[in-house]
Image (cartoon, grey):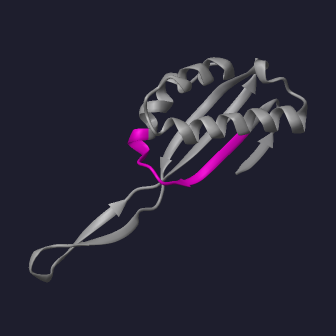
């Protein structure tokens, strides 16, 4: 995880999350542009497994902002949230008559930029 601040912006990223970027974008779209507290409320009640890494990353960004820069958590909002595809884990599944069938297990990278109101 990486954190930077310039002009009251906090940037946090998580790389190689073992989940499809499509599934994470389904969770990310409703919280884009929301305040930190609203985003937490929305993520708490969503029924998807993809909420966990985003919730963890959001709370980490807020804790970094509070601890390192003295910014109050209630003043934060999500400026940019972006999900990019990562590398595929390539595996093989045995099939009939000695053949092998390729399996691609996707990963993704999540970037969150938070700002101050």
- Whether residue 72 appears in magenta in the rendering, the answer is no
Q: Quadrant of the C terminus?
A: top right
- Asked whether the viewer can see residue 92, the reply is yes
Q: Is residue 5 depicted above or below 33 in this figure?
A: below
- Whether residue 13 appears in magenta in the rendering, the answer is yes
Compare residues 63 and 65 and report the one nearer the observer.
63
Q: Whole-percent x and y of residue 61?
A: 73, 37
| x 40%, y 56%: residue | 106
Q: Is residue 35 left or right of residue 116?
A: left
Q: Is residue 85 depicted above or below 80 in this figure?
A: below
| x 50%, y 22%: residue | 45
Looking at this view, name the residue that lies furthest to the left: 97
Q: Is residue 30 left or right of residue 80?
A: left
Q: Whole-percent x and y of residue 72?
A: 84, 23
Q: Is residue 29 left or right of residue 101?
A: right
- Asked whether the viewer can see residue 112, the reply is no
User: Which segment did they paint magenta?
Assistant: 11-23
Q: Whole-percent x and y of residue 70?
A: 90, 30
Q: Is residue 89 left or right of residue 63?
A: left
């Amino acid at each position: 995880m990486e954190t930077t601040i310039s002009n009251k912006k906090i940037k946090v990223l998580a790389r190689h999350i073992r989940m499809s970027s499509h599934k994470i974008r389904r969770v990310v779209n409703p919280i884009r542009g929301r305040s930190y507290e609203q985003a937490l409320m929305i993520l708490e009640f969503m029924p998807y497994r993809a909420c966990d890494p985003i919730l963890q990353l959001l709370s980490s960004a807020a804790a970094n902002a509070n601890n390192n820069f003295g910014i109050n958590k209630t003043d934060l909002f999500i400026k940019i949230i972006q999900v990019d595809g990562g590398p595929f884990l390539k595996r093989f599944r045995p099939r009939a008559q000695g053949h092998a069938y390729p399996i691609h297990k996707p990963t993704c990278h999540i970037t969150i930029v938070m700002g101050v109101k």
